[in-house]
Image: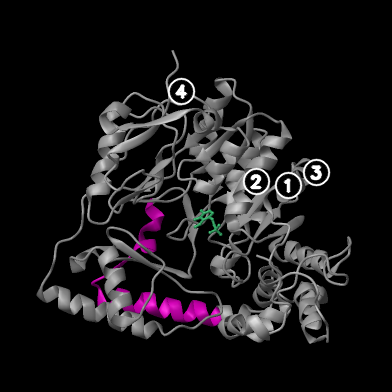
């Protein structure tokens, strides 16, 4: 764990890009360029100014302004260097289309390496990574995360499972382009990134860690370490999630490992392919500010950690709710958990997690990030102190009421269908001629779509894979449940599927 700010250079005290935007805002200028609001609140822009504030308008300036982002030593470049230093990376890219962009960039860069075309990926890969696999014409081979069958949630990949998957792939003569894993999970389960990196590197492959939910890692001794410092070759970071920047802003960190020199130019190319030529200055500036706040926010983060631990303590003392992370030691892949996530099994109340989440927001004004059949997960931003006693009081009140009139709503999810053979490359299946057929006709055909039943959100079919009767039945059962749905489905009941047209 790197200590901030004592071992960090004074450089980390600066916010070069954000400060350059502020200086521009303070200047008396006439903007005869885009955006059309001219950075002023007058005329047609009055409404917009009322909506988001005069200052936001004044800093919403286009790219390529001298003194801000022009040249190799610009304020913008300096800001990305400070971010790289803060997260322990060799280089960092600032992104304006979320970690989704970072995942697509990662896949495209891997394809550009020409090290092979097989990516051994955690089956619960985020759709943006599988989109990148499609774009880069990579061939996914899957390694399954550990699954909490009782609660229908998936965690991470165990290094031994990865080693076996890579050994199996090598024995099939696959040339591995990379390994992709997710850590932390939605529920805050943290995988052994150092061990996963060691395994991937031993098999000659770079490791991509989708750390979308862990952008705050490494900024307090009680938080898990930043994946870049643990050997991840690429870290995907959804900085806006828990890193404190504005929604949609994100980062990609390139580690300083054995593949860095080859990956760097490929990531540059992938960035050009995916970043807007009019990236929002406000989003980019928020990344610079968020980095500064995290680096110097140790004390505030410590206070958050303390109040969140108090919340967990109150729930444990009450006894009617189970803290899911208390049982993480049963899963071999989990080596730590994100203490800023409070994952709560609510099934003893008789309410589903989804219903609980609805009641909390409608009746108590408490909004939670995630719910599943049995659980809800609260996310507490680092350095923030929301009114957690209002949350616990609401939980206790709901439990009191539920004790009097329990409503059994917990749905028993069927077991995940068996993995199916991939009959076509995902990209070929996606771009091939396709047709829409009924569910019964789809059995035995090749899917052109990606379909993932929530919970637990593991893709059950990806383009190129065969559709089996078991998969159809599973997807329809989840879709018909009061709390389930299938992402990517053509209709809510899964009556139709998009399949590759057969040629004779
Ligand atoms: C594991 C994972 N990776 C990537 C993303 C994409 O992040 P963003 O919403 O910043 O594009 C998400 C989004 O929730 C995610 O859960």
Kindly check if marks 2 and 1 are in contact, taking CB atoms under 8 A apart as contact: yes
Mark sitting on residue 267: 1
How far is the residue under mark 2 from the one under mark 4? 25 Å
How far is the residue under mark 3 from the one under mark 2? 14 Å
Regarding mark 2 in the picture, which secondary structure is present there? Answer: helix
Comparing 461 with 82, the one in front is 461
Q: Which residues are magenta?
A: 302-330
Instruction: Name which of mark 4 and mark 1 comes first in the sequence.
Output: 1
- Residue 497, percent from left and from top: 35, 35
Regarding mark 3 in the picture, which secondary structure is present there? Answer: helix
Kindly identify the residue that appears in the image at 45 percent across and 58 percent down. 186
Instruction: Name which of mark 2 and mark 4 comes first in the sequence.
Output: 2
Q: Is label 1 within 8 A of ligand 1 (CB to nearest ligand atom)? A: no
Mark sitting on residue 261: 3
Instruction: Name which of mark 2 and mark 1 comes first in the sequence.
Output: 2
Q: Is residue 169 magenta?
A: no
Kindly identify the residue that appears in the image at 45 percent across and 36 percent down. 462
* Residue designated by label 2: 106
């Amino acid at each position: 764990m790197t200590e901030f700010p004592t071992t960090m250079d004074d450089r980390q005290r600066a916010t070069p890009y954000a400060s350059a935007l502020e200086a521009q805002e303070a200047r008396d200028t006439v903007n005869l360029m885009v955006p059309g609001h001219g950075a002023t609140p007058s005329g047609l822009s009055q409404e917009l100014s009322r909506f988001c504030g005069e200052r936001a308008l004044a800093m919403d300036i286009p790219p390529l302004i001298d003194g801000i982002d022009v040249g190799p030593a610009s304020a913008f470049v300096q800001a990305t260097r400070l971010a790289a230093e803060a997260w322990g990376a060799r280089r960092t890219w600032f992104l304006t289309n979320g970690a989704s962009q970072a995942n697509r960039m990662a896949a495209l860069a891997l394809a550009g390496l020409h090290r092979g075309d097989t990516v051994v990926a955690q089956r619960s890969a985020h759709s943006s990574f599988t989109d990148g696999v499609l774009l880069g014409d990579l061939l996914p081979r899957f390694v399954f995360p550990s699954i909490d069958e009782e609660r229908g949630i998936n965690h991470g990949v165990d290094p031994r499972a990865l080693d076996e998957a890579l050994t199996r792939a090598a024995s099939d003569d696959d040339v591995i382009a990379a390994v992709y894993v997710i850590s932390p999970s939605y529920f805050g389960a943290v995988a052994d990134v150092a061990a996963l990196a060691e395994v991937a590197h031993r098999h000659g492959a770079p490791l991509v860690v989708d750390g979308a939910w862990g952008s705050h890692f490494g900024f307090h001794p009680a938080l898990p370490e930043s994946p870049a410092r643990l050997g991840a070759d690429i870290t995907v970071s959804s900085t806006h999630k828990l890193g404190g920047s504005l929604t949609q802003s994100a980062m990609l960190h390139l580690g300083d490992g054995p593949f860095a020199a080859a990956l760097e130019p490929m990531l540059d190319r992938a960035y050009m392919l995916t970043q807007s030529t009019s990236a929002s200055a406000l989003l980019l500036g928020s990344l610079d500010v968020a980095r500064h706040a995290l680096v110097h926010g140790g004390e505030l983060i410590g206070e958050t950690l303390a109040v969140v631990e108090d919340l967990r303590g109150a729930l444990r003392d009450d006894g009617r709710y189970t803290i899911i992370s208390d049982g993480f030691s049963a899963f071999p892949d989990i080596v730590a958990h994100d203490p800023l996530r409070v994952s709560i099994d609510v099934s003893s109340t008789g309410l589903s997690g989804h219903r609980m989440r609805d009641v909390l927001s409608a009746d108590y004004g408490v909004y939670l990030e995630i719910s599943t059949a049995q659980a809800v997960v609260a996310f507490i931003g680092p350095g923030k102190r929301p009114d957690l006693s209002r949350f616990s009081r609401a939980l206790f009140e709901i439990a009191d009421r539920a004790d009097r009139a329990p409503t059994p709503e917990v749905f028993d999810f069927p077991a995940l269908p068996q993995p199916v053979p991939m009959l076509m490359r995902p990209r070929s299946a996606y771009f091939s001629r396709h047709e829409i057929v009924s569910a019964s006709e789809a059995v035995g055909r090749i899917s052109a779509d990606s379909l993932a039943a929530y919970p637990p959100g593991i893709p059950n079919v990806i383009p190129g894979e065969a559709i089996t009767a078991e998969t159809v039945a599973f997807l329809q059962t989840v879709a018909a449940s009061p709390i389930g749905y299938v992402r990517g489905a053509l209709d809510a009941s899964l009556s139709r599927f998009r399949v590759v047209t057969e040629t004779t």
